[in-house]
Image (cartoon, helix red, strand yellow):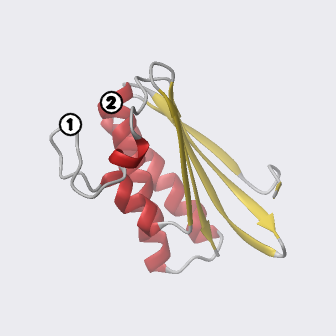
Amino acid sequence: MVLDKALCETCVSIKHDADVLLAYQKGRALAAEMGFSNEDQMIVVIAIMEVARNIVRYAGQGEVSFSVFQQDGRHGLHIVARDSGPGIPSIERALENGYSTGGGLGLGLSGAKRLMDEFEITSRVGQGTTIEMKKWK
């Protein structure tokens, strides 16, 4: 993968619910600039909202970054959410529909994974979590 930072990169610090709103607004604006359909823009918004809300809820702070990338003649939107929070003890369990340690519906991470074209979580207990998501144009 060749990431061309000159095309576009934006980073949003996430600490409060208002930052979640800012992150998904920036993600949607970038998707719109890239020519994504309204439906795909909403998919991007929902995925960003889920991972950014998890940062606020479980880690307290982190960041979400956006960049345009090109690979094999195609381009897409790359979203990375990272924090240095408590980490996820069982990624497999966290991706199960209905599983929640925070009292929610347990559909956030699994929903974001279903919505995006590529989705990867790396996490270390006590060190934090990084979620990488890609949506192809």
Image vertical order of residue 87 relative to residue 7, above or below: above
Q: Nearer the viewer, residue 91 or 22?
A: 91
| Label 1 element class | loop
How far across and down, in percent of the image, does residue 115 sit? 44, 68
- Location of the N terminus by quadrant is bottom right
Instruction: Left or right? Give the position of 125 relative to 30.
Output: left
* Residue 71 in picture, x, y percent from top left: 81, 67
| Image coordinates for residue 70, horizontal then vertical, percent | 79, 65
Q: Which residue is mark 1?
A: 102
Location of residue 71 with respect to 73 vertically, above or below: above
Q: Report the disc number at residue 49.
A: none
Q: Residue at x 32, y 53 (%)?
A: 108
Are dots 1 and 2 in contact, CB under 8 Å?
yes
Q: Farthest left residue?
A: 103
Q: Amino acid at mark 1?
A: Gly
Q: Earlier in the sequence, mark 1 or mark 2?
A: 2
* Quadrant in the picture for residue 55: top left
Callout 1 environment at 10 Å: few (<14), some (14 to 19), or many (20+)? few
Identify the residue under disc 2.
Answer: 58
